[in-house]
Image: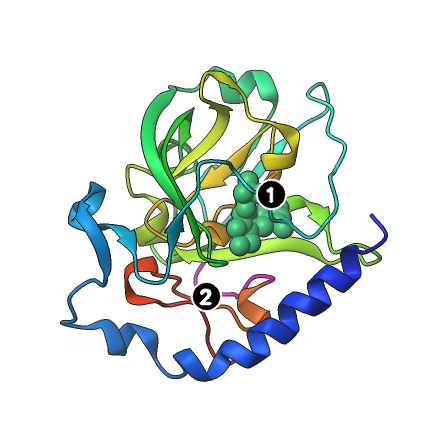
């Protein structure tokens, strides 16, 4: 896609303008604060629509502009880092794991939210139980098969292990009863319903368990490290 690098540039400029909205230590800022949003109390006891979001009925595509070509016969998911039993899953290996279904919402930081997505896949927690995180593992860094166009910088995103092992964090291969479309991260992506959607890596290929937090692609470029939709936690000062 010819305009893809430009897309990243445009989003960075947009971020630059938004930084002033959300400077400082977001975790400290939220302590004791009520969640912000509208609508009835939804999943997780939060207002249905997070502050600054609007509902969409379609499902927009947001990524770096590169659609990786993935063959299920050679597809692997590597789970490594601070774990007792590092594991490289094949597609058959993934499908042989206990499968889970869930319905959850999808909140994109660019202000759209999509309700009631029906997912099927494997819980992150199930994978974590297989590899057994070591005592010092407190963070995860996920990597996709895609790179920023014209570079060898892969998509990555980080989250605390404590958020990754929540019940609604899934590695999904099925959406609304159909294989997850390639443009939405098929054959396999992660979803993080309690956090903004960029924390869910499309075309996921690696999950690394870490002792120290390591920022991902957008976290290094001005998006919030914590990404809490009900606290308008969109941006942070880049390190
Ligand atoms: N591998 C990869 N995962 C990614 C992205 C990406 O560019 N590459 N974009 C993120 C962003 S910013 C969002 S909002 C969601 C969008 O998912 P969708 O395109 O299925 O709506 O995927 C996230 N996961
Ligand atoms: Mo996004």
Helix, strand or loop status at disc 2: loop
Residue 213: which disc?
2
Residue 129: which disc?
none
Residue 2 on the magenta segment:
no
Image position, residue 142 (x, y; %): 54, 49
The quarter in which the C terminus is drawn is: bottom right
From this view, report whether residue 21 is shown above or below residue 66: below
Q: Residue at x 71, y 46 (%)?
A: 146
- What is the C-alpha distance between the residues marked 1 and 2? 28 Å
Image position, residue 7 (x, y; %): 72, 60
User: Does any portion of residue 143 appear in the rendered image?
Assistant: no
Q: Which residues are magenta?
A: 207-217
Front residue of this view, candidates 140 and 121:
121
User: Does any portion of residue 93 appear in the rendered image?
Assistant: yes
Q: Quadrant of residue 60?
A: top right
Check the image and tell me how it is coloured: rainbow
Image position, residue 161 (x, y; %): 36, 52
Front residue of this view, candidates 40 and 183:
40
From this view, report whether residue 98 is shown above or below residue 206: above
Main SS class of the magenta portion in the image? loop
**First along the sequence among labels 1 and 2:** 1
Q: Quadrant of residue 6?
A: bottom right
Front residue of this view, candidates 237 and 75:
237
What residue is disc 1 on? Answer: 61
Packing grade of label 2 (10 A; few <14, some 14-19, many >=20) is some
Drawn side of residue 34 relative to residue 187, left or right? left
Which circle, 1 or 2, is nearer the viewer? 1
């Amino acid at each position: 896609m010819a305009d893809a690098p430009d897309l990243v540039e445009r989003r960075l400029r947009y971020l630059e303008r938004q930084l002033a909205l959300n400077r400082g230590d977001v975790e400290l800022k939220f302590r004791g604060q009520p969640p912000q949003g509208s609508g009835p109390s939804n999943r997780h006891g939060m207002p249905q629509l997070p502050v600054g979001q609007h509902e969409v009925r379609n499902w927009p595509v947001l990524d770096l502009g590169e659609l990786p070509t993935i063959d299920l016969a050679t597809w692997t998911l590597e789970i490594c880092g601070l774990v007792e039993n590092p594991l490289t899953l094949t597609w058959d290996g993934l499908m042989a794991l206990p499968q889970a279904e869930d319905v959850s919402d999808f909140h994109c930081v660019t202000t759209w939210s999509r309700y009631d997505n029906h997912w099927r896949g494997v819980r992150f927690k199930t994978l974590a139980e297989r590899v057994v995180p070591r005592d010092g593992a407190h963070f995860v860094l996920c990597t996709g098969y895609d790179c920023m166009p014209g570079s060898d910088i892969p998509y990555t995103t980080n989250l605390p292990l404590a958020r990754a092992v929540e019940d609604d964090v899934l590695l999904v291969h099925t959406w609304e009863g159909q294989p997850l479309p390639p443009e939405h991260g098929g054959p396999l992506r992660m979803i993080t319903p309690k956090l903004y959607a960029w924390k869910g890596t499309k075309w996921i290929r690696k999950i690394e368990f870490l002792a120290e937090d390591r920022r991902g692609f957008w976290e290094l470029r001005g998006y919030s490290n914590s990404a809490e939709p009900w606290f308008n936690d969109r941006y942070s000062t880049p390190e």
